[in-house]
Amino acid sequence: MKSFIITDKDAGGRVDRFISKTFDKLPKSLMYKEIRKKNIKVNKKRCTPEQVLSSGDLLELYLKDDVLEIRKKHYDFLNASTDLDIIYEDDNIILINKKVGVLCHPDGKDYIDNIVARLKRYLYDKKEWDPETSTFTPSLANRIDRNTGGIVIGAKNSQALKIMNDKIKAREIEKYYLTVVHGKMSKKSELLSAYLTKNEKKNMVTVTDYQVPNSKKIITEYTVLDYYPDASLLEVKLHTGRTHQIRAHLAHIGHPLYGDGKYGNEKGRYRQALYSYKLHFNFSDENILSYLNHKTFQANNIELLDEYKEKKFK
């Protein structure tokens, strides 16, 4: 017999998923059978496989010890780097300053070392998360391309992940970017609007001043922070969030990003001067993350600013 007190990190998960993830020697058919026979209970009462667990729930399994051996194995994330630039952290979320060149999620070539793997290792080393017992896997609510740096939002539990995903979709998390573009802007600040059409096959977009079939409206706001004869340092705020919006929109008005080999004139270069450096939370309702409302978080140690100050953009 084994029993568990469900923690905040496991709350929101289903009974069957928690059990399957915890006990790899327990066949699913046997698990469902024992649930029906009331040998698996929640808070001393009969439960169902799809029942959602809450924090503080008592889960009891009156089964033989040989099928209740807790899963143990080696984890690839333990081979990930421990380099994690943390901007902010609490019990629900963690804000990470992702450096240029680092992937957010694994791909075929870089499966081991990425931000998700580093986050898992960090929380595992702190004993805040254990894949043996937790039904939730630390996840990112947003992603940033490998060649772009900036703030990514990590979630420590399912509730936080859902709220962050919803708030990003509702545009209640304002994102600000730093970028360096070719030339000197004619205006100190401007609210730009246009239409963007995506070519899925080429993974490119086209910007037009007028609406065309399958196009979507884009709104991009910029403020000039500094400039020298051949380059302007901008802060950009997205009012819409479309693929390659900043890169394509600024190139459309004649100011492509430095290092942009796709939308600029620097063919063969794919390290565009772009950094997602600031987030502002502007929630419209009460939730478990309401303590973040109206707060702003900003990254430090931004390579883009160092390179600009050294006048490397010429």
Image (cartoon, rainbow, N blue to C red):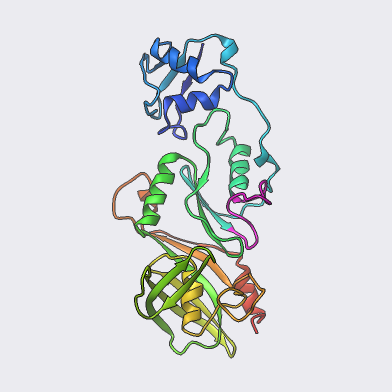
Towards the viewer: 256 or 207: 207
Quarter of the image for residue 54 reads top left
Number of callouts in the render? 0
x then y, percent, for residue 126: 60, 38
Identify which residue is drawn at 64% across, 57% down: 102
The answer to whether 234 is drawn above or below residue 83 in the figure is below
Identify which residue is drawn at 44% across, 34% down: 8
Towards the viewer: 289 or 178: 178
**Quarter of the figure that contains the C terminus:** bottom right
Identify which residue is drawn at 36% across, 74% down: 212
In reply to whether residue 99 is colored magenta, the answer given is yes
The answer to whether 230 is drawn above or below residue 251 in the figure is below
x then y, percent, for residue 83: 66, 52
For residue 103, side relative to residue 246 (left or right)? right
x then y, percent, for residue 219: 38, 73
The answer to whether 212 is drawn above or below residue 45 in the figure is below
Identify which residue is drawn at 49% across, 32% down: 135
Judged by its main secondary structure, the magenta piece is loop
For residue 90, side relative to residue 114 (left or right)? left
- Magenta stretch? 98-115
In reply to whether residue 152 is colored magenta, the answer given is no
x then y, percent, for residue 5: 46, 23
